[in-house]
Amino acid sequence: MKEALDRLSSAALGQLPSGSGVPGIQIDQVLLRPRNPLPDGPGALEVLQFGPLQGLLSEAPPLDFTLVTVGRVLARGTGLEGLLVSADVDPGYLAGETVWVLPSGRDGYFSQETRVNLRSDLPLPRYLDYRIRVGAARSVLNERAVRIELATLDGFLELAEAAEAALPPGTPPLNFLTSIRKLLQEPELRGDGDLRVWSRRRVAPYDGSPGPRTARAERRDRLAALAVVQRGEERIDLGRVLRGIDSAARQGPQSPISSPRADLALTWAGDLGRALAEFVIARYAPRASAESRTWSLDRFAARHAPLPRLLGDLDGVTIGAGYDSNLTVAANLRSYYELSVLKRCTAFVAATVDGAGQPALPLTAGLRFTDDAVTFAAQEILAFALHHLRMRLGGLADGVRTLGQAMLAPDSAEVLLLTRRLLDLLEAGLLAELSPPADTALIVLRPDGGRFGGLALRLIPPGGDHPGLPATTDALGAVTAPDAGRRSWGVACATHELTTDLTTPVPITQLSASRTPPDPVLHHTLQPGQTLELYARQVIHLDCLQCGWTYRIVDAPPAVFSCPNDGYDLAGLRSAVLADPDAFTAPVFGQNPESSPASLTSRGYRSIDTAHGRVTSYWDESRFLQPSGADYLLWALTPGGPLSVSVLGRATWGAAPVRIQPPGRRWEFHEAESTSSPPYAGLPVPLSENRPLADVYSWMTIHHTASSIVYTADGVRELQAEQITKSKADLAYEFVIDGNGLVYEGRPLGIEGEHAELFNAGNLGIVLTGDFESRWQNGYVGFDRPTTAQLQSLDRLVDVLAHRFGIRSVWTHKARKRQASAVPTECPGAFLEPRVAALRRLYPGPPP
């Protein structure tokens, strides 16, 4: 799929009417920035553009967000003087507040923000409509309508139905399903899946045919963007649904390889088994990175078997067992999701059989799975884990399996943890589906008395039978407890304190120096037949800048409070964070800048207004400007908690001295002339010396070396020498990631790189060693794939840099060169580009 920004920029919208003085409006990018982002959620959602002023959002928006429209006012001469830009939100289903903004500079670029609250008393709409207006004084001179389509199941069904209807007569019924399944799957999963569904191996991923090239590309890209869709309050991985259907015994899959059952390997057993295999590889494979060895099995499970995938797995197995190939894909899915999904877990258990065709997941009278069911699930997860080890490691698999033998057993704690991940989900669903309806409910209100929709809770049954059921309040702020007519349920919440009293302050809780938020706090108990109303008071976890301890603070806290360890004024710090959370990302420590090195310093102080007056916090980034420094730990406080990356300093890996010559190349701090390139117009990048780098960096650009993957410091030294011979002052990038996932310091962070034409100042360069683009070499196609360790290190490094320095935009080199109108490149290569695209969805912009 093309970059969303490229599609937006190429639309050429809002041209000036011929011979008129009416200003035109050009829309370049639309973002939805959550007001209260989830701990692991993106900082902003970028709207993918398809067609003039119409977009497709690939995730459901929060109820409370800021709508950011980036564009340009088109006017001749001095026609920009006095013009203002605002957004008019459709009041039919949106309630928002907007401001007028001035276009910046003589080019008319603007970034307009509107606070939007989706009405919680109505269902989530399929479309969001609004208008961008340009005016002078009190008159509106021009306006443009913008429509954002949410990524919903209904949208997928509509597109899939139209695409299938356009196919040539006589197309085999399952071929279209297979082509869509291949389109929605990650590249690394296609080959293994195609081996298992061998009978349709020659079916190509859906390309949008028939029709002109432009129409085909748009049809294909729109469907590809709907891999994960929203259905009510659920997110469902449709790729997993189609994999389950395609691999079901009813469809007759054939496999030329000896491997676990296709219907299980391509659904839940494959996802959970992959998590176990990758966990064992991280622990015992020779080339596993030191960082991945510290990851928990839960983290691997969350990556390879998140809830949307497991829901897709369940639905795929169920639909596949009764799939009617005489009907369209859309008709089969619509029939299931309109009716049968109400009994999802019941139908899945009924459809899951063993090799003899007998029920594989038997239940007790109390809706708990028997020991035989646990054994069946554990054996299937383990079977795929062992197969995945062989596929990933080849000849090394036996050695790694021997080292991880304790984990690779049907009764190991690791296999049991993954087994319970599936069975607990099913048991909770069965409990809700098979229990009689009850009138026991919870209604959550905001402090102002409004209904609080979309709040994540957990319902804890008595007796410890279950760890708790996840629940989310509906548009009316209500949650109905399952089986509540016969039992009581505890109510817990991690992000809010639920209370009947808004006046009494909640004591501040000191957690620990590990900065680990506590488990959800059990607040109240729902009794059978009771409807309980509770207010939700926001909880924040705040780190003391002096001692590093974390405190749980509930609104409204005492007006004056300080850290009991060192007296630091936490009231002032909390006020500063809540006033502008996005801007409060610069590294702030309790250090004295006078003790820093005298040369190449980047240090200073900032003031925070507190209840006791002004508090001075010092910052010091001297280490990031040293041309010959030792190892360091790069740390950031992310929404998911503290995160760090170990960086091998230039002194450690033996970097050669900086080459200041040949003439024309300088060892320079980040600084861009306002006329150096179009993106810097009106956005000068300041010198990095004696200025926090959070004020300097705006972007990250990801590269590959276009050469073999290297696994040692020798390879990094050779890369430096090669680039110096190409008239560069030093390594072009700030960071290098080798095949083991080790992160090397390239240029010091405060020094401008040489990796993106016209875009070096304020642009942080990261390169992965390897050639990730297919190329003809001596008569055959040669390429590398990024190693798992490289991808894991890239994800972690980008997250740390983004939150440490406030960087909100990630680019490929390919996209940057296109924007700079430079010689085209395929960097970072086809096998790395999808991962960078995923990072860009987390950190999309805004441009330039």
Image: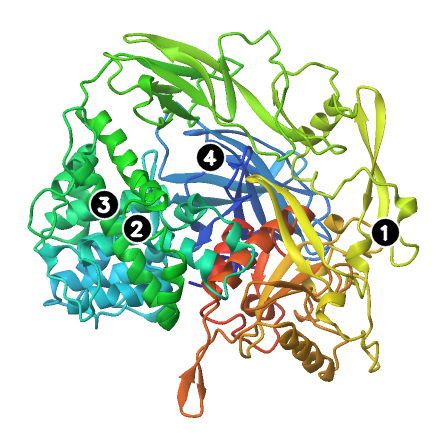
- Quote the CA–CA distance across marks 2 and 3: 13 Å
Residue labelled with disc 2 = 409
Q: Is residue 796 above or below residue 364?
A: below
| Count of marks, rendered view | 4
Say which mark, if any, is on residue 690.
Answer: 1
Quadrant for residue 546, please give it.
top right
Task: Give the class, few, some or many, for how many residues have Cα within 10 Å of label 3's Cα (few <14, many ≥20).
Answer: many
Q: Is residue 791 left or right of residue 589?
A: left
Determine crowd level at label 1: few under 14, some 14-19, many 20+ residues with C-alpha closer than 10 A. some
Splitting the image into 4 quarters, where does residue 184 fall?
bottom left
Residue 485 lies, in percent from the top left, at 24, 12
The residue that mark 3 highlights is: 377
* Residue 11 in view of the camera: no
Q: Amino acid at mark 2?
A: Ala
Q: Report if the CB atoms under discs 3 and 1 are less than 8 Å apart.
A: no
- Left or right of residue 328, residue 614 in this image: right
Q: Residue at x 76, y 67 (%)?
A: 651
Tell me which residue sits at (46%, 59%) in the image.
284
Residue 421 at x, y percent in the picture: 32, 39
Of tags 4 and 1, which is closer to the observer?
Answer: 1
Classify mark 2: helix, strand or loop: loop
Mark before the other along the chain sequence, 2 or 3: 3
**Mark 4–mark 1 distance (CA, rounded to whole Å):** 38 Å
Q: Amino acid at mark 1?
A: Asn
Q: Position of residue 757 (x, y in %)?
A: 67, 71
Q: Estimate the spatial distance between the alpha carbons at disc 2 and disc 1, rounded to whole Å.
A: 57 Å
The amino acid pointed to by label 3 is Ala
Q: Nearer the viewer, mark 2 or mark 1?
A: 2
Q: Nearer the viewer, residue 805 or 677?
A: 805
Quadrant into which the N terminus falls: bottom left
- Residue 453 seen from this side: yes
Secondary element at image label 1: loop
